[in-house]
Image (tube, grey):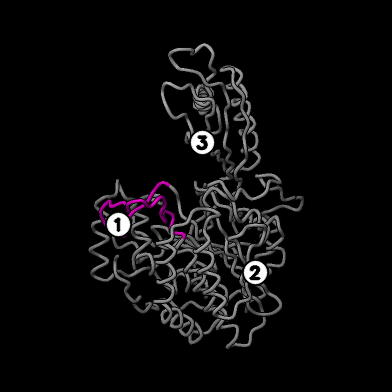
Amino acid sequence: MFPLLRLVAPVFCCLCISTYAHADETREILNYIDARYEQTAKVAEALWDYAEVGYQEVRSSRLLQDSLAAEGFTIQSGVANIPTAFTATFGRGKPVIGILAEFDALPGINQDASPQRSPIKNKAAGQACGHNLFGAGSTGAAIAIRRWLEDSGTQGTIRVYGTPAEEGGSGKVYMVRAGLFDDVDVAMHWHPDDENGSFARTSLANRSAKFRFRGVSAHAAGAPHKARSALDGVEAFNHMINLMREHVPQETRIHYVITSGGNAPNVVPDFAEVFYYVRHPRADHLKDIWKRVEQAARGAALGTGVAVDWEIIHGNHPLLINETLAKMMDKKMRIVGGVIYNRQEQAFARKIYATLDNPHFALGDQTKVQPYKVNQGYGSTDVGDVSLTVPTVGLSVATWVPGTSSHSWQAVAASGTSIGFKGAQVAAKTLALGAIELFKNPELRNAARVEFELRRGADFTYEALLGDRAPPLDYRK
């Protein structure tokens, strides 16, 4: 394991603090988070070790709940009919500031905390999106904010949302549906990345489903005429979708994996399953494309003489940007600064960097905060549904070696080292400063609400893209 190393003191190169926050107060909160580095790092490392997948994050959820309960937060477990979802609340009255905390891992990829490709034997998942850092950093920020609320006597409530199954399970959507964000004034989140910045970045709407084809088994050589292959249905369906790619809007993303295709070549499979994701920047366009996907599934089944049904697994709206909040967070991140490597971390980073294909950042860029920008992101997140319910702001932190892609072994490796843990500290500090500004600055909160209402539209009605289904608690089993 790459050793835990204490985060160096931040450099205050530009204390452009608003009139609502004093320099001494800012230094005090940053120093407090630095003093808690070891606790935050231990939580991040434990979540990395657990690497529990969506809705199975029992130990991960319990660790975060226990960490917050020990600091005086009131815990509500199993919210929204999800055993691993929780809220942790401290304070009283308005405003209510929410901080999101993810903790699920990705199946099918694992890696030791090593700069060379080194899978861990018998481990089925890894923190390839850095959600161990997400959960630990958000928890660290909330604990610091709790202390500030108590010491300053400020009225308001800080609430942590323990949000499971972001990776394809849409845990936050069920929490939105359950009304858990209805009293929140502003929601805050962050995400591990290979760059630092608070951007007004939206995302792609996303819907997924498992398409299940059912046929008739028979001996593949002795009686093939008596069989109807469910795998033929899947392959015909996939072929039709691949032809359709030419005739969908260019921003569309479609990807799939065959999750069941039979067990032996000489047995015609009577069951086969394929798992699809479909994405587009606009939810209404996604719905139109999805109708064509369903028609293709029906056509494939009809053409191969099998039956088909499908289960919607998840659905996420795109992020609704809020520039009022994003610009505020950009200022706070510039106070905190980027991630500083020590000599040992630099050596680790150089080895990782040598494995990257055409990296778009240079080593050393982890120390910088990238210019503020408004742009389209091509990932998807269930934070999008939160952002349609309450003004929401996020940031990215260089928890990985510059140029690293998420969902890669290099991301898993750095997420389990002090490189990642230092990034979680940067996130905790930026979130804490942003929350304090929100507690003390009613004009900022009001301006964010006005922008939120304007961008969402006066006639907006929320509709979950996954419908009224119950949480798919077994989708990773």
For marks 2 and 1, give the CA distance: 43 Å
Amino acid type, callout 1: Ala
Q: Give the class, few, some or many, for how many residues have Cα within 10 Å of label 2's Cα (few <14, many ≥20).
A: some
Tag 1 or tag 2, which sits nearer the N-term? 2
Q: Main secondary structure of the magenta part?
A: loop
According to the picture, the residue beneath numbered tag 2 turns out to be: 76
Q: Is residue 325 visible?
A: no
Q: Could you tell whether 186 is left or right of 252 in the image? A: right
Asked which secondary structure carries label 2, the reply is: strand
Residue 205 is situated, as x and y percent measured from the top left of the image, at 58, 45
According to the picture, the residue beneath numbered tag 1 turns out to be: 362
Q: Name the mark nearer the viewer: 2 or 3.
A: 2
Query: Magenta region: which residues?
Result: 108-131
Tag 3 or tag 2, which sits nearer the N-term? 2
According to the picture, the residue beneath numbered tag 3 turns out to be: 254
In the rendered image of this protein, does residue 335 appear above or below residue 217?
below
Q: Residue furthest right?
A: 459
Residue 167 is situated, as x and y percent measured from the top left of the image, at 51, 51
Asked which secondary structure carries label 3, the reply is: strand
Amino acid type, callout 2: Gln
Amino acid type, callout 3: Ile
